[in-house]
Amino acid sequence: ETKSSAADARKEIAASGLKVMGACAIVLRLNDAEWPWEKQRVAFLPQLDLAAQLESPFVVCVDLGQRSPSATDDMELLTQRFRTLAEDAAPRNLKMCLEFLARIGPVNCLSTAIRLVRQVDRPNFGLLLDLYHFHLSESRLDDLGALPEGKLFMGHLDDAPDVPIEWLTHNQRAFPGEGTLPI
């Protein structure tokens, strides 16, 4: 069995006329006793290395962990951990894009994601705005006014079918213009 290297993959990508736009995803798990932070961070470093070797400018990061009873404690931990990830990514010339996932994890709406971007306060840590997650969450367009200039790093343009929002799931996306969102 032949194993390909990141350099081989880079050559194939270039030969196909393609360019890596982003790597997906660093999955941080807050408050997970079976997957402590120290173990997670060690696992993230090879992922960051691979993204850098593939010349990806961005790495998407999400939090799929559980909330604790204290929002203050959780936000402090998330800030510290995402700050560490941003610092680990910086020498690799990577920008970290925080994507909030509606209805999932502690960071599940635009206002909380923006608050976290502001608290992490690193030049290479910004926001990925996914229109479908925006639609499913408690987010408001006015929330974008709190995002610091230059911190919207990436967007996912997708649409939602004409289904009541309570029945929409994460796998019911549509291509832009084929659904009901006012894109």
Image (cartoon, helix red, strand yellow):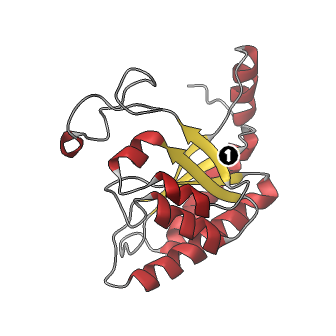
* Nearer to us in this view, 77 or 169: 169
As drawn, which residue projects farthest toward the top? 16
Q: Quadrant of residue 174?
A: top left
Can you tell which quarter of the image residue 109 is in?
A: bottom left
Q: Is residue 159 visible?
A: yes
Q: Which residue is mark 1?
A: 58
Query: Which residue is depicted at the point 72% across and 57% down?
Result: 149
Residue for point 31% across, 83% down: 69
At a point 31% along the width and 41% down the height, the residue shown is: 170
Q: Quadrant of the N terminus?
A: top right
Q: Nearer the viewer, residue 166 or 107?
A: 166
Q: Which residue: 33% across, 57% down?
A: 104
Measuring from the top left, give residue 2's x and y in whole percent: 61, 25
Q: Amino acid at mark 1?
A: Phe
Where is residue 40 shown, x and y percent of the image?
A: 51, 66
Q: Residue 36, how many percent across, how many down?
A: 45, 74
Question: Could you tell me residue 168's position as x and y percent?
Answer: 24, 39
Q: Is residue 41 visible?
A: no
